[in-house]
């Protein structure tokens, strides 16, 4: 099959494998022996903070960057030596890179014209793509006459009109405002489903990754730290680094005070938290309790004495459905939690958290990874 035929054939693939993919820039290691399998039809998110190697991984898949070591195989066949245009992948980046002097329709048709696709076929496919991104009535406009979200939709239409077997997206929503980001997120997912695409999506936004992906791969310093379904990664982060990323805003380094029946109790300066160990070897001296703000509850009088803590509220912010609060324990631990309503600074509240929502890791304060947002 010729490369063009491969790109046009709307056939997916069984699996794409990255095998020991390593990429160096001088002496710095941007990707360190990445082994990853992407299944046809899957929506995979590559998640991690700035500099962890997400874009490098995507560019290696796209063929924009050669590998330093390793291989990429599509259904067993090596493709890492192929130039980008022969891989049959579509790309959507954060700067939409539309042609400013061409209409929306011409921008979307461009790739097909270059391939000398027949006029009637181009018209049919462009119409279909524009309908899909709901831009039919803007087809005659120039990109400069569109909003940021509309321009991004043109960029997506331009990629999917080629019916690529894999769509690579690098932070495609990062230039949009918050409301549009959420809308476009749904559209991207819908398109992925409706067109039966395989998508690899790079983002540093955990909410976006969790909302969109079938599987999330979290990168840290060029290596895979955890991979799993959004539910798995969110509920059972494999490390404090991932926990910090997944909204476990309370990462409290405390020594171990007791171990009993599969539970572990940490205690420090008057704060005592019992939780569930997430790793096998948790040393006595260096453990971290990870708790999500929304898992703390304001305790009633009948509160279970396990995991009861009293905090002085310093700040409470109205967030619509609930109030986000920051407080401090008598011993000086800063606690992030939620309240049903705002309270005056200096108020004292009793909090509690279920044992199963206190995740215990080995580690120290330095190892507590990125903070939420
Ligand atoms: N062209 C380059 N020359 C030198 N170093 C590079 C180059 N591109 C990337 N790097 C380095 O490789 C590492 C990974 O970069 P990469 O862009 O893949 O990270 P990222 O996770 O996508 O970050 P961001 O979200 O900020 O784009 C970083 O340390 C970066 O400085």
Image (cartoon, rainbow, N blue to C red):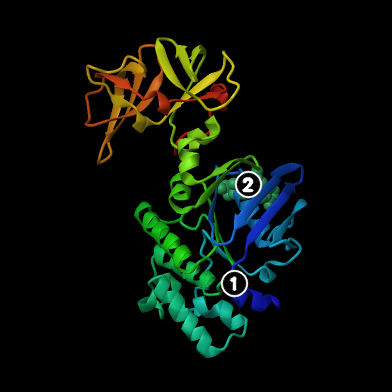
Residue drawn at point x = 43 percent, y = 18 percent: 274
**Residue 342 location, quadrant:** top left
Q: Which one is closest to the eye, mark 1 or mark 2?
A: 1
Vertical relation: 301 (above or below) 324? above
Q: Which mark is residue 316?
A: none
Q: Where is residue 138 in the image (x, y as percent from the top left)?
A: 38, 76
Compared with 185, 268 (above or below) is: above
Q: Is residue 157 in view?
A: yes
Q: Quadrant of residue 283?
A: top right
Kindly check if marks 1 and 2 are in contact, taking CB atoms under 8 A apart as contact: no
Around disc 2, counting alpha carbons within 10 Å, would you say few (fewer than 14), some (14 to 19), or many (20 or more)?
Answer: many
- Name the residue tied to disc 2: 53
Q: Where is residue 212 in the image (x, y as percent from the top left)?
A: 45, 53
Quadrant into which the C terminus falls: top left
Task: Write down the quadrant of residue 135 in the picture.
Answer: bottom left
x and y percent of residue 291 in the render?
A: 42, 28
* Precedes in sequence: disc 1 or disc 2: 1
> At x 54% / y 22%, what residue is drawn?
365
Q: Which of 309 and 24 is in front in this view?
A: 309
When the figure is inspected, residue 246 is found, relative to residue 109, above or below; the finding is above
- Asked if the residue at label 1 sits under 8 Å from ligand 1, the reply is no
Q: In this view, does 326 lie to the left or right of 226?
A: left
SS for callout 1 = loop
The Cα atoms of the two marked residues, 1 and 2, are separated by 29 Å
Q: Which residue is located at x 31 percent, y 21 percent?
A: 351
Compared with 200, 261 (above or below) is above
Task: Give left or right: position of 294 versus 30.
Answer: left
- Count of all numbered marks drawn on residues in the image: 2
Mark 2: C-beta under 8 Å from nearest atom of ligand 1? yes
Q: Quadrant of the N terminus?
A: bottom right
Q: Mark 1 points at which residue?
A: 11
């Amino acid at each position: 099959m010729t490369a063009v035929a491969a790109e046009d054939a709307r056939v997916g693939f069984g699996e794409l494998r990255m095998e020991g993919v390593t990429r160096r820039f001088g002496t710095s290691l941007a990707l360190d022996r990445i082994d990853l399998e992407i299944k046809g039809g899957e929506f995979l998110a590559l998640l991690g903070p700035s500099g962890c190697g997400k874009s490098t991984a995507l560019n290696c898949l796209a063929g924009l960057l050669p590998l330093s070591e390793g291989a990429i195989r599509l259904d067993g066949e090596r493709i890492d030596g192929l130039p980008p245009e022969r891989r049959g992948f579509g790309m959507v980046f954060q700067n939409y890179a539309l042609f400013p002097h061409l209409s929306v329709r011409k921008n979307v048709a461009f790739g097909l014209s270059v391939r000398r696709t027949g006029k009637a076929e181009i018209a049919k496919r462009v119409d279909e793509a524009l309908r899909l991104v709901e831009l039919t009535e803007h087809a005659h406009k120039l990109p400069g006459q569109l909003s940021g979200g509309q321009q991004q939709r043109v960029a997506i239409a331009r990629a999917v009109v080629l019916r690529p077997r894999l769509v690579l997206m690098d932070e495609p929503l990062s230039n949009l405002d918050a409301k549009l980001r959420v809308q476009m997120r749904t559209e991207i997912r819908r398109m992925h489903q409706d067109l039966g695409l395989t998508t690899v999506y790079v983002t540093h936004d955990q909410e976006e990754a969790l909302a969109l992906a079938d599987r999330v791969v979290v990168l840290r310093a060029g290596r895979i730290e955890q991979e799993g379904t959004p539910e798995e990664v969110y509920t059972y982060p494999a490390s404090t680094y991932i926990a910090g990323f997944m909204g476990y805003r309370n990462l409290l380094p405390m020594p171990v005070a007791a171990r009993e029946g599969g539970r572990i109790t940490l205690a420090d300066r008057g704060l005592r938290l019992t939780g569930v160990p997430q790793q096998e070897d948790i040393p006595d001296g260096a453990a971290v309790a990870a708790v999500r703000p929304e898992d703390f509850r304001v305790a009633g009088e009948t509160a279970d004495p396990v995991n009861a803590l009293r905090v002085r509220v310093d700040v409470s912010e109205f967030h619509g459905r609930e109030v986000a609060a920051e407080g401090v324990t008598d011993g000086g631990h800063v606690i992030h939690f939620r309240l049903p309503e705002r309270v005056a600074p200096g108020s004292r509240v009793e909090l509690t958290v279920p044992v199963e929502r206190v995740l215990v890791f080995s580690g120290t304060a330095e190892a507590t990874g990125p903070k939420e947002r």
